[in-house]
Image: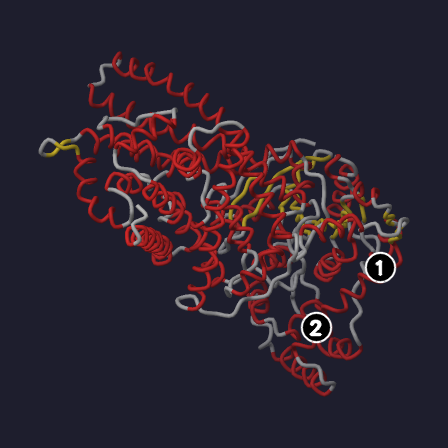
């Protein structure tokens, strides 16, 4: 199988599929619950290259890729993970609408072989919409370890559609899967797919409505499914059906009369619209249970005992939070210890190119001021950003993805769900908060998983209280210089990690406090409920984790940071080299800010460094050094003892160090995060609020700490 993949941008999905259908391309939808290995199936079929965009009008990403079989080209569309097509979230709505209205040539529903009963619910709902379904029972290797046996031929016979077993990670069964897809795309089903049987009251109501719908031009929508949706009174979906059919279905005279009669019948039976929806959902659950009783056997009692034992450790009230904190500290320690040497080597390597670039510009006849702007300004700033950001991200993001693939991240959300519920926020915010440790822009984008717009905004505004890896160097340097001293070795790195973890826990506490305050003021509302599945623990796929982390996260975030750091370097160089009245603009602005900064426990240079560090937090310390030393370019000092002497000579005390750490933790989001906030909210107002809230809180907290220390003569 070969791949020719392409990406589709926002708003391009409908047009691209319509154009492609004019040729010989077959469109295959890939659906499934979260955590069933759907992305692995997609990656294996399309060569591990996902091309992503946004669904039209939605902040839900899509991925598309192509593969060939027997001379036929197939476009595989990876739908968002969904538990149901009853559309309780934006992801489920997108998946349902694509299957309903885009008329794919086939729909592959991926299920987890270790918990097939829960996954069959989605497959049965899909069969209500289209008969062109292939059931992919994935993770057979995991099921085999638990001695779970599935009679795939019998399951296929009962469902009336092809059923293929796969172990996508080992590339097993995928040839059979593409063969089944080919047969479904080319021919008519040789068997009648299974349809759900509803309670008698529902069936009698459908019997009144379906015969009226069948003669109408419903395109490819089944009359029975449309009747169920009309009786469910799903107004949003009915509006989509009307738009698809290009006429208002409910106002059609015959449909209107039959619908009213069916509704009267249900009312006489005591079936309200809410009860009707519950009966429909329960029918799928009961049928899935019956199917599994007939086709799934457990050869070993207690096949899930290991997962339950781990859950008792990782999610219990006594041990869940402590283990989570220890694991968090361990990840930070690996990131800190592992990134030091690569950062230094990368910095040395890139800084060596400075002289070559300067010589090249001189050879080209560039004037000294242009040479300084491009080399000392833009290039040195980019070197700082790349050398400081790349190594920790290259370590942190794979570690984060390993936790994600192993099934632990949903356990973190479970542990913190009650805390966020008390704040009237969503428990899924725990996941977006974890994403923010690598990069706040990633955490902000991750807020898409939160369905409630109100709770999504809370997660976006408060994500900045989690320090990204751009702020880690500043925090670690200050902790090492002022609170650890000259100690070195394993003990010093562990102590540094514990102190850093304490600072981060303060940021998490501020997340809870601010989330609660927002939910009681400008974002009032009741916390929404959501489905949180605790997937089975699995061994992560190391190679795919590294590839996905580097290309989808690390390089993406680094590219954004570089794009904003280049003009920032130019601005910083200009401020440091342009003088007014014998003073550089940098020194002049620092002096103007100094009185206010002193109230916060800082000084004018520190505050100015944070302002100039708005494009990239990584350059805050170099800008401080440039201002203190009155140099015209970013200065690098690798010896922390020498740096501490320099800072102490500028009046730094333990209070300055604490307030600088607090301000680094709590201050405004960087430019990349602000751009992402605007992109996600499409609102300048909420972008400004997201900037103002942490800014005010950072200033208030630093002012209170400095005032308290001076009041009691502690500094």
Left or right: 401, with 636 as reference point? right
Which residue is under mark 2? 278
Q: Nearer the viewer, residue 109 or 469?
A: 469
Work out how far the residue at label 1 is from the one at label 2, CA to CA, in angstroms.
20 Å
Q: Is residue 571 visible?
A: no
For the C terminus, give its image quadrant: top left
> Residue 130 placed where, x, y %?
72, 58
The structure residue drawn at horizontal position 49% and vertical position 46%, both measured from the top left corner, is 502
Label 2 secondary element: helix
Q: Nearer the viewer, residue 389 or 36?
A: 389
The structure residue drawn at horizontal position 48% and vertical position 52%, both measured from the top left corner, is 508
Q: Is residue 672 visible?
A: yes
> Residue 224 placed where, x, y %?
72, 69
Q: Nearer the viewer, residue 571 or 537?
A: 537
In the image, is residue 443 above or below residue 125? above
Label 1 secondary element: helix
For residue 291, the mark is 1
Marked residue nearer the N-terminal end (1 or 2): 2
Furthest-front residue in this view: 713
The structure residue drawn at horizontal position 28% and vertical position 51%, both measured from the top left corner, is 710
For residue 176, the mark is none
Left or right: 369, with 655 as reference point? left
For the N terminus, give its image quadrant: top right
Q: Quadrant of residue 652?
A: top left
Left or right: 264, with 580 as reference point? right
Quick one: label 1, few (<14), some, or many (20+) residues within 10 Å? some
């Amino acid at each position: 199988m070969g791949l020719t993949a392409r990406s589709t941008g926002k708003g391009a999905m409908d047009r691209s599929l319509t154009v492609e259908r004019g040729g010989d391309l077959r469109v295959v939808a890939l659906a499934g619950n979260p955590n069933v290995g759907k992305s692995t199936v997609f990656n294996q079929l399309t060569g591990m290259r996902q091309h992503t965009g946004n669904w039209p009008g939605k902040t839900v990403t899509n991925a598309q890729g192509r593969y060939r079989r027997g001379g036929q080209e197939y476009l595989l569309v990876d739908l968002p993970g969904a538990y149901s097509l009853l559309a309780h979230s934006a992801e489920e709505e997108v998946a349902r609408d694509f299957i309903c209205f885009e008329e794919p040539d086939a729909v592959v529903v991926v299920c987890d072989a270790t918990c097939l009963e829960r996954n069959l619910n989605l497959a049965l709902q899909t069969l209500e919409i289209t008969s062109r379904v292939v059931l992919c029972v994935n993770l057979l290797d995991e099921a085999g370890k638990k001695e779970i046996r599935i009679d795939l031929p019998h399951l296929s016979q009962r469902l009336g559609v092809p059923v293929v077993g796969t172990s996508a990670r080992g590339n097993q069964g995928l040839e059979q899967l593409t063969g089944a897809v080919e047969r479904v795309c080319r021919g008519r089903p040789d068997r009648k797919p299974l349809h759900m049987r509803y309670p008698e009251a529902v069936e009698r109501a459908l019997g009144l409505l379906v015969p009226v719908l069948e003669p109408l031009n419903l395109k490819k929508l089944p009359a029975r499914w449309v009747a169920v949706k009309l009786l469910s009174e799903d107004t949003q979906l009915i509006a989509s059906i009307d738009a698809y059919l290009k006429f208002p279905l409910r106002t059609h005279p015959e449909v209107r009369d039959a619908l009213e009669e069916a509704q009267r019948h249900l009312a006489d039976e005591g079936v309200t619209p809410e009860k009707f929806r519950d009966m429909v959902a329960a029918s799928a659950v009961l049928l899935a249970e019956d199917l599994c009783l007939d086709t799934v056997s457990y050869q070993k009692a207690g096949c899930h005992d290991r997962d339950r034992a781990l859950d008792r450790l990782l999610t219990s009230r006594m041990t869940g939070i402590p283990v989570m904190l220890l694991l968090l500290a361990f990840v930070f320690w690996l990131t800190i210890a592992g990134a030091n040497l690569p950062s230094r080597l990368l910095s040395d390597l890139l800084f060596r190119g400075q002289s070559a670039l300067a010589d090249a510009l001189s050879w080209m006849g560039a004037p000294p001021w242009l040479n300084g702007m491009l080399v000392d300004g833009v290039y040195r700033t980019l070197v700082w950003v790349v050398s400081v950001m790349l190594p920790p991200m290259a370590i942190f993001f794979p570690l984060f993805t390993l936790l994600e693939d192993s099934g632990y991240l949903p356990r973190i959300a479970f542990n913190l769900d009650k805390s966020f519920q008390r704040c009237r926020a969503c428990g899924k915010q725990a996941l977006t908060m974890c994403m923010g440790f690598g990069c706040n822009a990633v955490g902000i984008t991750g807020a898409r998983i939160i369905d409630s717009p109100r709770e999504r905004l809370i997660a976006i505004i408060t994500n900045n209280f989690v320090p990204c890896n751009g702020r880690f160097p500043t925090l670690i340097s200050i902790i090492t210089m002022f609170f650890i001293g000259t100690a070195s070795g394993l003990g010093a790195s562990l102590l540094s990690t514990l102190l850093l973890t304490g600072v981060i826990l303060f940021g998490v506490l501020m997340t809870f406090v601010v989330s609660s305050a927002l939910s009681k003021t400008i974002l009032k509302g009741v916390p929404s409920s959501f489905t949180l599945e605790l997937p089975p623990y699995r061994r992560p796929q190391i190679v795919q984790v590294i590839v996905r982390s580097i290309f989808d996260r690390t390089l993406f975030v680094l590219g954004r940071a570089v794009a904003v750091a280049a003009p920032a370097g130019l601005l910083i160089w200009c401020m440091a080299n342009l003088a007014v009245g014998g003073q550089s603009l940098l020194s002049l602005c620092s002096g103007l800010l100094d009185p206010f900064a002193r109230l916060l426990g800082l000084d004018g240079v520190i505050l100015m460094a944070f302002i100039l560090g708005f494009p990239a937090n990584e350059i805050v310390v170099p800008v401080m050094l440039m201002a203190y030393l009155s140099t015209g370019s970013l200065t690098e000092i690798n010896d922390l003892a020498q740096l501490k002497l320099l800072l102490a000579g500028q009046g730094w005390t333990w209070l300055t160090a604490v307030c600088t750490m607090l301000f680094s933790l709590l201050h405004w989001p960087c430019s990349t995060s602000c751009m992402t906030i605007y992109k996600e909210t499409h609102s300048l107002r909420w972008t400004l609020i997201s900037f103002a809230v942490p800014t005010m809180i950072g200033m208030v907290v630093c002012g209170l700490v400095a005032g308290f220390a001076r009041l009691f003569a502690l500094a």
